[in-house]
Image (tube, helix red, strand yellow):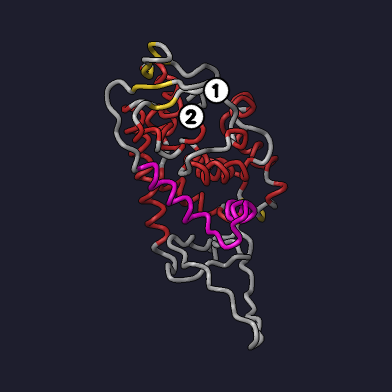
């Protein structure tokens, strides 16, 4: 329970990264040409990958420069972020290395029971998780909710349709990083939608939220809350007002992603070696 907000804002960070680097004027690489290899009669072909549920539309508008490689993407992303929010804020909030990879890992972990804290894309915020009471009878201190307010305020100002469009524009880097995690047939946009859906299923916890402390870490006293995913737990920990705002913006993002996905062919199969973007 001492962990900060990073798992909940992982989804937003992914699309924000796309918005921030948009000023860099990159474009999607050309799609690969698929060559159908012949299969010997004695070899049983591997099962086809599941159909893509949320296909990323192709980008038909060329830009001035190609996308950087995944390995070379950190510096242009940091420079673009610094140009938008300032060098001081960038250095204070953003981890300098493996930015895209850490975003993808965070999103992949949000709907799981445990999240890799050391792989978050941003630095920890100052302050500690605040509680009332003692180890035997504790509740979340409402003052703790204020730690999340600056991020929620920024989130409220974001245009989710614009964020979705720019996220799709820079999709190849996210797709490549996702496949490098060990999902060669994976499709990152489907994983993003799954994660958003999981967060939207978070119960609306009202009133005092009881905690227990069997060892070092605080746990939710309610087994139902304790069995939530890592991202859902943090949404509850943000407080009901912040949670409602985040859910509303996630619904907007979910709708924007779904609207763009309808422009693609939802029945096509995953391209394990491609960018997933056409």
Which SS class for mark 2? helix
Task: Check disc 1: other Cα within 10 Å, few if <14, some if 14-19, many if 20+.
Answer: some
Residue occupying the point 51% across, 49% down: 167
The residue wearing badge 1 is 125
Residue occupying the point 44% across, 47% down: 195
Task: Check disc 2: other Cα within 10 Å, few if <14, some if 14-19, many if 20+.
Answer: some
Q: Evaluate if marks 2 and 1 touch, with contact meaning CB atoms under 8 Å apart.
A: yes
Q: Would you place residue 99 above or below residue 264 in this image?
A: above
Tell which of 114 and 162 is nearer to you.
114
Identify the residue at the far left of this view: 207
Task: Indicate whether residue 88 is drawn in magenta.
Answer: no
Q: Could you tell whether 118 is left or right of 151 in the image?
A: right
The quarter of the displayed image where residue 122 is located: top right
Q: If you read the primary sequence from the N terminus, does the residue marked by circle 2 or circle 1 appear first?
A: 2
Identify the residue at the far top of this view: 133
- Res. 5 mark: 2
Q: Could you tell whether 272 is left or right of 151 in the image?
A: right
Image coordinates of residue 221 in percent, x first then y, are: 36, 26
Image coordinates of residue 175 in percent, x first then y, are: 58, 55
Start and end of the magenta stretch?
Answer: 173-200
Q: Could you tell whether 191 is left or right of 253 in the image?
A: right
């Amino acid at each position: 329970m001492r962990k900060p907000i990073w798992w909940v804002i992982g989804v937003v960070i992914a699309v924000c990264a796309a918005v921030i680097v948009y000023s860099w004027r990159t474009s999607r690489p050309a799609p690969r040409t698929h060559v159908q290899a012949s299969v010997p009669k004695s070899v049983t072909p591997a099962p086809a990958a599941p159909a893509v549920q949320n296909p990323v539309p192709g980008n038909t508008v060329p830009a001035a420069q190609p996308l950087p490689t995944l390995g070379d993407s950190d510096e242009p992303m940091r420079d673009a972020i610094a140009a938008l929010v300032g060098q001081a804020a960038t250095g204070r909030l953003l981890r300098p290395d493996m930015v895209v990879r850490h975003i993808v890992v965070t999103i992949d972990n949000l709907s799981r029971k445990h999240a890799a804290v050391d792989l978050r894309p941003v630095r920890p915020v100052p302050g500690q998780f605040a509680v009332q009471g003692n180890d035997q009878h504790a509740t979340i201190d409402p003052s703790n909710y204020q730690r999340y307010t600056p991020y929620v305020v920024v989130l409220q100002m974001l245009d989710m349709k614009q964020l979705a469009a720019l996220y799709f524009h820079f999709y190849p880097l996210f797709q490549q990083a996702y496949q490098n995690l060990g999902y060669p047939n994976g499709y990152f946009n489907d994983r993003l939608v799954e994660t958003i859906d999981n967060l939207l299923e978070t119960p609306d916890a009202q009133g005092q939220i009881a905690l227990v402390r069997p060892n070092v870490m605080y746990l939710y006293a309610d087994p139902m809350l304790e069995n939530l995913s890592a991202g859902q737990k943090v949404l509850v920990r943000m407080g009901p007002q912040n949670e409602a705002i985040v859910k509303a913006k996630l619904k907007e993002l979910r709708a924007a992603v779904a609207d763009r996905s309808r422009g693609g062919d939802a029945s096509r199969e995953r391209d394990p070696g491609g960018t997933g973007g056409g």
